Amino acid sequence: MFIRELSVLNYKNFGEVTFSFSKKLNCFIGNNGVGKTNLLDAIYYLSFCKSYFNNPDSQNIHHSEDFFALQGKYALKGVVEEIHCGYKNGQKKKIRRNKKEYERFSDHIGLLPLVMISPADSVLIQGGSEERRRFMDSVISQYDRTYLDWLVRYNRVLLQRNILLKNYANQPAIDPDIFAIWDEQLVQLGQKIHSKRDSFLQELLPVFQKYYTLISGGNEVVSLEYGSQLNEGDFAVQLKDSFAKDRIVQFTTTGVHKDDLELKLDGYPIKRLGSQGQNKTYLIALKFAQFDFIRSLNGIKPILLLDDIFDKLDGERVEEIVKLVSDDHFGQIFITDTNREHLDGILREAGGDDFRIFIVDKGSISNIIEKQ
Ligand SMILES: Nc1ncnc2c1ncn2[C@@H]1O[C@H](COP(=O)(O)OP(=O)(O)OP(=O)(O)O)[C@@H](O)[C@H]1O
Ligand SMILES: [Mg+2]
């Protein structure tokens, strides 16, 4: 699967521009702030109906306009797929597949698998547990629609239970039956979510470790453990046991909404001791493992977006990544960089001539020169 053509209109700092891509390697080269990441984001948008950076759609529109439109032409299993995403201020966002509008955006997610590696991923290590839950959830829900449905229902039940806890806060005694109906649903959904996350991570771990070892040269040991209260015992019992505490704090303190991932380097939390290059290696290995995982589901190679991937890495690690991405294991790749140095390394390694380089220049779109 690959994107053959992209048309961008009024997306972030771009006016109107169209691209014709290589099905293997595409590079956006240019100085800081010219819009390289924005172009990757436009490609991401066409797969996920939203920006990678989770900003409201109004912020994705070029400052001087009131709408944006993106169009991608893909080759998927030998068939051309035309995807259109458009948003106008004050109106509902529209996503069309072959001119037919989707009723639910979730029906589109997963059609065009894609993995993005970006400097912004550092929040996975540095941010709160919700970032790591979002990582698990976004990968699993790309291939499992029911999972997304369980999550939505779990969060709805959780909200209701928390509202009840607040409403009954000042009452000395509560009839436990009032909570029973919510607890039952929370347990049922929570256990399903827990078991999905657990099996996903068990599959991901060895692949992640393999990639980390490859890139780092094998001098460091990394691990990734699923931290969940549900690992410790029966969720229904835990929920009952924590009821008195929940009453005091007025929210539900037990459940999969408290899950986390313990990211470790040589046995210690990477958040505290990882160097910048080690953190970056950790995230790249994690995303490569995500790539393999999604690829293994239906054999389709996801599009790989590599934003500033070589920054902060030493020469040896860069060389290993260059070797990795030059391999046929990966499908279509987009790389951004401020100069051609790394790119030339990849081109030497891969040896093929199936690539395109786009020199991105700030300001008007006509300054984008395509070279082959
Ligand atoms: N809605 C918008 N309208 C106009 N310009 C925007 C909008 N959103 C972002 N920009 C501009 O896009 C530019 C940043 O683009 P981007 O992050 O893609 O740069 P980059 O080429 O990846 O740079 P770097 O090499 O530093 O990563 C900024 O100058 C910013 O002002
Ligand atoms: Mg950038």
Image (cartoon, rainbow, N blue to C red):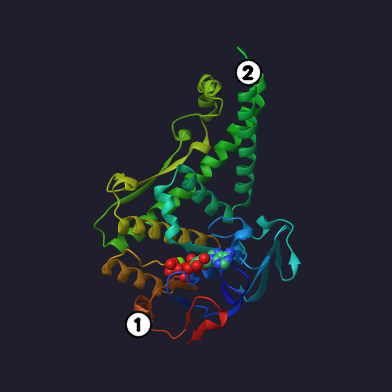
> How dense is the environment of label 1, judged by Cα within 10 Å: few (below 14), some, or many (20 and up)?
some
In the structure shown, which secondary structural element does the residue marked by tag 2 occupy? loop
Determine the residue positioned at 36% across, 56% down: 282
Q: How far across and how far down the image is residue 84, in percent?
A: 68, 69
Q: Image check: 110 left or right of 372?
A: right
Q: Residue at x 30, y 51 (%)?
A: 274
Q: Quadrant of the N terminus?
A: bottom right
Q: Which residue is mark 2?
A: 176
The residue type indicated by label 2 comes to Pro
Name, please, the residue furthest toward the top: 172
Q: Position of residue 110 (x, y in %)?
A: 60, 60
Q: Which residue lies under the disc numbered 1?
A: 348
Nearer the observer, 320 or 327? 320
Q: Quadrant of residue 13?
A: bottom right
Q: Residue 152: give x, y in percent of width and height.
A: 63, 43
Please state if 276 lies on the left or on the right of 64 as rendered.
left
- Percent position of residue 250, x then y: 56, 25
Question: For the residue marked with disc 1, what is the amino acid?
Answer: Arg
